[in-house]
Amino acid sequence: MTEDLLAAPGFPRSARYHPEWITCAVSGGANSLWLTEWLTQDLELRPGMRVLDLGCGRGASSVFLHREFGVQVWSVDLWFSVDERASRIRDAGMADAVFPLHADARALPFPAGFFDAVVSIDSFVYYGTDDLYLNYLARFVRAAGLIGIAGAGLVRELDERIPEHLRDWWEPGMACLHSADWWRRHWERSGLVHVELADTMPDGWRRWLDWQHTVAPDNGVEIQALTADRGRTLGYVRAIARRDGVPEEPVTAIPVGYTARPLIRDGSPDPGSRR
């Protein structure tokens, strides 16, 4: 059953990878290979490009990107062990082309314009909803470079009420989930990028459900929520944008100097002197 689910139609590249290799690299609630393959169907990558795989988890997406497209990959994550990721990359024979780093998405150790493309698989929601983040990230992408994200999201934005059938599963942190249209507006209003694509995966909720049945069959609350929802609210979304604006330089320090001035006006009563 595992092999059949992981060989889902529509993901021919991902289907070539061994099920045990995929499940041993689980780092979240989505199949990172499916999402990477879906994203790269419309995000053009060429051999030799420098790609940042941001929030890469345990690195399966990084291995996939190099193997399938011949790109150099900087494999960056904050939460998962960089040593375990390095072992996976080395065993795949990619130590000279996929470079694992432990770093925070808000404190990246790269020069401006270093990357041809940034890819983020099922992690961008944890930091990219910040109104100022795109300006920060765009500094590391060359002019006309690409930024692409794919992951869990909403088919439509929710009003103030969480649907009844999702309440047992929903947690406050899930407020970071948004629709493809939301991501388009969020990015385009920055003036930094042109959004080339923002859409929802057809039957994405089924792929989400397949993944849960494969790697977390005891996760009854999430499985029940997805089954009850049937794609009305939950699914996978992606967005691809090209940098066409100039990011503002970050403010790292504001120079000031101290000049002594009188603290109290002359003639004013001083409550501090009263006994």
Image (tube, rainbow, N blue to C red):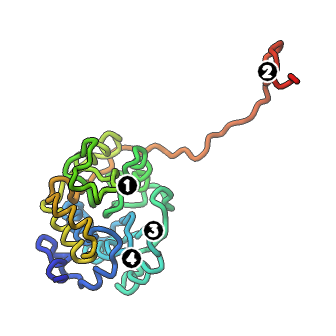
- CB within 8 Å, label 1 to label 3: no
Res. 173 mark: 1
Upstream in sequence: badge 2 or badge 3: 3
Q: Quadrant of residue 33?
A: bottom left
For the point 16% across and 60% down, the residue is 228
For the point 37% across and 49% down, the residue is 129
- Residue 131 picture location, percent across and down: 40, 44
Q: Is residue 65 visible?
A: yes
Q: Quadrant of residue 74?
A: bottom left
The secondary element bearing badge 4 is classed as loop
Name the residue type under label 3: Trp
Name the residue type under label 1: Gly
Q: State whether residue 46 is above or below residue 22.
A: above
Q: CA distance from mark 3 to mark 4?
A: 22 Å
Q: Quadrant of residue 186?
A: top left
Name the residue type under label 4: Ala
Q: Which residue is mark 4?
A: 97
Q: CA distance from mark 1 to mark 2?
A: 48 Å
The residue nearer to you, when weighing 57 against 212, is 212
Q: CA distance from mark 4 to mark 1?
A: 35 Å
